[in-house]
């Protein structure tokens, strides 16, 4: 896969991560143990599928800047590998150029 394509896919996922950071902030204020609907963080720009997570589950994913969560059949093995399977979603780690971009753009540093 070309670096340009990897970069484009990573940027799509970073957009969804930004949306989810805002959802997490509201969820934390409302009640962190309640499941909330987050946006699937796959690379498909027109995907608006939802994944239910508690704030604690969300924080587990965000602990690593290269990790994203998504609907199980949205995984793109060219740029990511599944590191954990959960009820209704998977957690993936970005590899290569996509991983470097994800780590560099991690809003949590």
Image: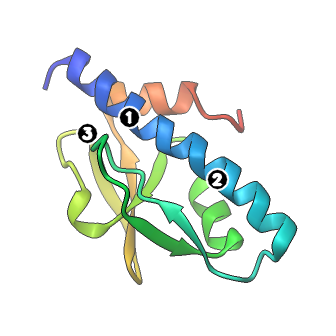
Residues at marks 2 and 1, CA–CA distance in whole angstroms = 20 Å
Q: Which residue is mark 2?
A: 63
Confirm or deny contact between disc 2 and disc 1 (CB under 8 A). no
Say if mark 2 contacts mark 3, CB within 8 Å.
no
Q: Residues within 10 Å of mark 2 (few under 14, many from 20)?
A: few
Q: Quadrant of the N terminus?
A: top left
- Identify the mark nearer the N-term, 2 or 1: 1
Q: Nearer the viewer, mark 2 or mark 1?
A: 1
SS under mark 1? helix
Q: CA distance from mark 2 to mark 3?
A: 19 Å
Q: How is the image coloured?
A: rainbow
Q: Is residue 28 above or below residue 4?
A: below
Q: Which structural element holds mark 3? A: loop
Q: Secondary structure at mark 2?
A: loop
Q: Residue 26's spot in the image, x, y percent?
A: 77, 60
Point 38% across, 34% down: residue: 12
Looking at the picture, tell me which residue is in the foreground, 33 or 22: 22
Mark 1, residue position = 12
Give the position of the C terminus as an image quadrant: top right
Q: Is residue 30 left or right of residue 77?
A: right
Q: CA distance from mark 1 to mark 3?
A: 13 Å
Q: Quadrant of residue 13?
A: top left
């Amino acid at each position: 896969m070309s670096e340009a394509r990897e970069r484009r896919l990573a940027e799509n996922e970073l957009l969804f991560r930004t949306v989810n950071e805002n959802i997490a902030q509201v969820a934390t204020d409302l009640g962190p143990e309640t499941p909330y609907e987050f946006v699937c963080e796959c690379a498909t720009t027109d995907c608006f599928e939802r994944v239910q997570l508690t704030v604690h589950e969300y924080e587990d994913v965000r602990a690593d800047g290269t990790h994203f969560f998504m609907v199980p059949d949205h995984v793109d093995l060219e740029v990511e590998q599944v590191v954990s399977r959960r009820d209704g979603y998977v957690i993936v780690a970005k590899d290569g150029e996509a991983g470097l971009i994800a780590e560099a753009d991690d809003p949590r540093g």
